[in-house]
């Protein structure tokens, strides 16, 4: 919670530290944060909706944890986001259509979760996307939406 008071913090790299517990919602107060790396810990609980306040975020890596619940639609507000790694968690539900608003997004890694339903057609709006990884989501089905132009696609054989 004390980290949530560091209003000028721009980079927070806490990967591979064996941290446990939930991601503090106070991280949503870090309005100048550009880079957040929480990957490869033992973080649990839901993905904080407060992350939708991090409008200066460029890169968010929360992969390889034990995050549950859904990926909140508020992530679609992060207009500067170029890289979103949420792979290797227990995130379920639909992939939010609001991700289609992330025009700067170049990497979207959602593999190895529990997403279901079709990939949102709005992903076709991501003209900068060059890496998309969706494999190993038990309930994800359909096709890569028409118009998605990527250099590297993993998981083209969806259920």
Image: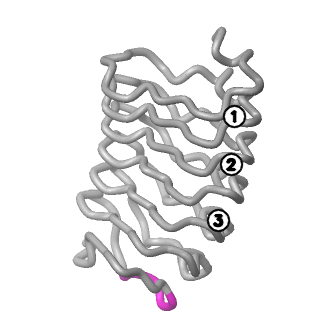
Work out how far the residue at label 1 is from the one at label 3, CA to CA, in angstroms: 17 Å
Name the disc covering residue 74, or none. Answer: 2
Residue annotated with mark 1: 50
Q: Is mark 3 on a helix, strand or loop?
A: loop
- Whole-percent x, y for residue 157 in the image: 22, 77
Q: Residues within 10 Å of mark 1 (few under 14, many from 20)?
A: some
Q: Quadrant of residue 34?
A: top right
- What is the number of the mark on residue 102? 3
Residue at left 74%, top 36%? 32
Give above or below for 157 relative to 80. Answer: below
Residue 145 magenta-highlighted: yes
Rendered view: 67 above or below 138:
above
The N terminus: image quadrant: top right
Q: Earlier in the sequence, mark 1 or mark 3?
A: 1
Q: Does 101 sit left or right of 35 as displayed?
A: right
Other residues around mark 2 within 10 Å, as few (<14) / some (14–19) / many (≥20): some
The range drawn in magenta is 143-147
Measured Cα–Cα span from mark 2 to mark 3: 11 Å
Which quadrant of the view contains residue 11? top right
Disc nearest the viewer among 2 and 3: 3
Q: Which of 113 and 141 is in front in this view?
A: 113
């Amino acid at each position: 919670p004390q980290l949530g008071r560091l209003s000028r913090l721009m980079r927070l790299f806490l990967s591979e530290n064996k941290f446990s517990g939930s991601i503090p919602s106070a991280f949503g107060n870090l309005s100048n944060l550009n880079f957040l790396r929480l990957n490869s810990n033992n973080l649990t609980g839901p993905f904080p909706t407060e992350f939708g306040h991090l409008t200066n975020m460029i890169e968010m890596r929360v992969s390889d944890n034990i995050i549950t619940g859904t990926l909140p639609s508020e992530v679609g507000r992060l207009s500067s986001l170029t890289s979103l790694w949420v792979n290797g968690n227990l995130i379920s539900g639909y992939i939010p259509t609001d991700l289609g608003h992330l025009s700067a997004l170049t990497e979207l890694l959602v593999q190895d979760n529990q997403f279901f339903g079709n990939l949102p057609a709005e992903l076709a709006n991501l003209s900068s996307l060059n890496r998309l990884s969706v494999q190993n989501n038990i309930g994800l089905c359909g096709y890569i939406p028409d118009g998605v132009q990527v250099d590297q696609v993993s998981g083209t054989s969806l259920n």
